[in-house]
Image (spheres, grey):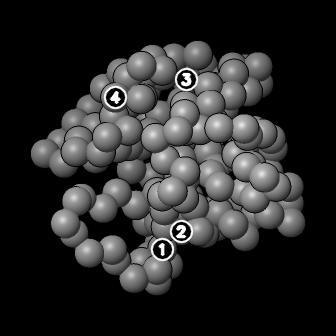
Amino acid sequence: MDHQIRKIRENEYSLLSDFLYEAIYIPEGTEKPPKSIIEQPELQVYIADFGKADDWCLVAEVKEKIVGAVWVRIMNDYGHIDDKTPSLAISLYEEYRNLGLGTALMKTMLQVLKNKGYMQVSLSVQKANYAVNMYRKLGFETVKENEEEYIMVCRL
């Protein structure tokens, strides 16, 4: 699919709330939660006041429409490892999944973080989420797990 990966523009930060909602894993046959779920403090940590030091975001654009985003920040979230490791979130609108855009976003973000001198990046993912395989192919390894999710790290 013809696409462009680029840095998010400040006037596009508001789109992160859409992509945060899209990042919520919904098991097959389960009803989507209301969009208001992203107002919960444990989810707002991903996007509140985005644009500070250690906040980085790339978007995927198809035909001049932003269809996906990958962003990182150092925060105390589900995937928190330490105060030097950014945590990653990624999502695509449903109709743009499984087309290679997520992998392209991830590869570009990993390179950006490496170039900025970060040693590693972390994320949290539900064990049943199909994206687990993509993360493993990109070099993420499980460092912690519980019944429902993996905490994964990619060394840069």
Q: Amino acid at mark 2?
A: Gln
- Specify the quadrant of the image occupied by residue 131: top left
Q: Amino acid at mark 4?
A: Asn
- Mark 4 or mark 3: which comes first in sequence? 3
Check disc 2 and report the residue beneath it: 44
Residue visible at 46% across and 83% down in the picture:
36
Check disc 3 and report the residue beneath it: 120
Taking the image as shown, residue 82 lies to the left or right of residue 61, namely left
What is the crowding at mark 3: few (fewer than 14 residues within 10 Å), some, or many (at least 20)? some
Residue visible at 26% across and 32% down in the picture:
144
What is the crowding at mark 2: few (fewer than 14 residues within 10 Å), some, or many (at least 20)? some
Check disc 4 and report the residue beneath it: 133
Vertical position of residue 124 compared to residue 19: above or below: above
- Mark 1 or mark 2: which comes first in sequence? 1
Taking the image as shown, residue 141 lies to the left or right of residue 46, namely left
> Which mark lies nearer to you, 2 or 4?
4
What is the crowding at mark 4: few (fewer than 14 residues within 10 Å), some, or many (at least 20)? few
- Mark 3 or mark 2: which comes first in sequence? 2
| Residue 56 in view, yes or no | no
- Mark 1 or mark 4: which comes first in sequence? 1
The reply to whether callout 3 and callout 2 are in contact (CB within 8 Å) is: no
